[in-house]
Image (spheres, rainbow, N blue to C red):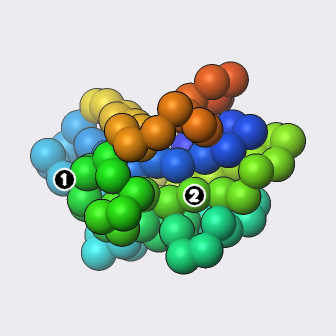
Amino acid sequence: MCVIRLAFLSVALTVLCVAAPINVALTGNGGLATQSSTYDPYLASLAIDGNTNGLIAAGSVSSTGPAVNAWWKVTFNGSYVLSSIDVFNRTDTDIGGDSGSLINPFN
């Protein structure tokens, strides 16, 4: 499980497993995303749909509402040895972003 904490979060996520080159975070591979709040219509699951386009208008990123200690989390369908964690941020704005972000794979 990876936890990312931001004041305002808009991301897409790719997590690759060592044993097989698959994105274990994808919804289709059993990943389940949740977040502290939702800035409609940008659901947590949009971050793990496989689309890493950084434009929020493309429907490719999740977004929490503005809040202190906002968070987004993905839970995997099993235990994996990970080879990488890639976080793709929004590319269409300067608000939000990854300032103060924390990726915690043990929480």
Q: Earlier in the sequence, mark 1 or mark 2?
A: 1
Image spot of residue 17 (x, y percent): 27, 43
Image spot of residue 92 (x, y percent): 38, 43
* Contact check, label 1 and label 2, Cβ < 8 Å: no
- Please give left or right for residue 43 compared with residue 89 in the image: right
Q: Nearer the viewer, mark 1 or mark 2?
A: 2
Image spot of residue 58 (x, y percent): 30, 64
Distance CA(mark 1)–CA(mark 2): 24 Å
Q: Which mark is residue 22?
A: 1
Q: Helix, strand or loop at disc 1?
A: loop
Q: Helix, strand or loop at disc 2?
A: loop
> Residue drawn at (46%, 47%), measured in percent from left and top?
11
Q: Could you tell me the amino acid type at mark 1?
A: Ile
Q: Is residue 42 visible?
A: yes
Most extreme residue toward the left is 21
Q: Which mark is residue 39?
A: none
Pick the front one: 78 or 36: 36
> Residue drawn at (20%, 44%), measured in percent from left and top?
19
Q: Could you tell me the amino acid type at mark 2?
A: Ser
Residue at the spot of label 2: 63
Most extreme residue toward the right is 68
- 86 vs 37: above or below: above
How many residues crowd mark 1 within 10 Å: few (<14), some (14–19), many (20+)?
few
For the C terminus, the image quarter is: top right
> Residue drawn at (59%, 37%), measured in percent from left and top?
95
> Residue drawn at (63%, 24%), measured in percent from left and top?
99
- Please give left or right for residue 31 compared with residue 68 in the image: left
- Please give left or right for residue 17 compared with residue 71 in the image: left
Image spot of residue 101 (x, y percent): 63, 28
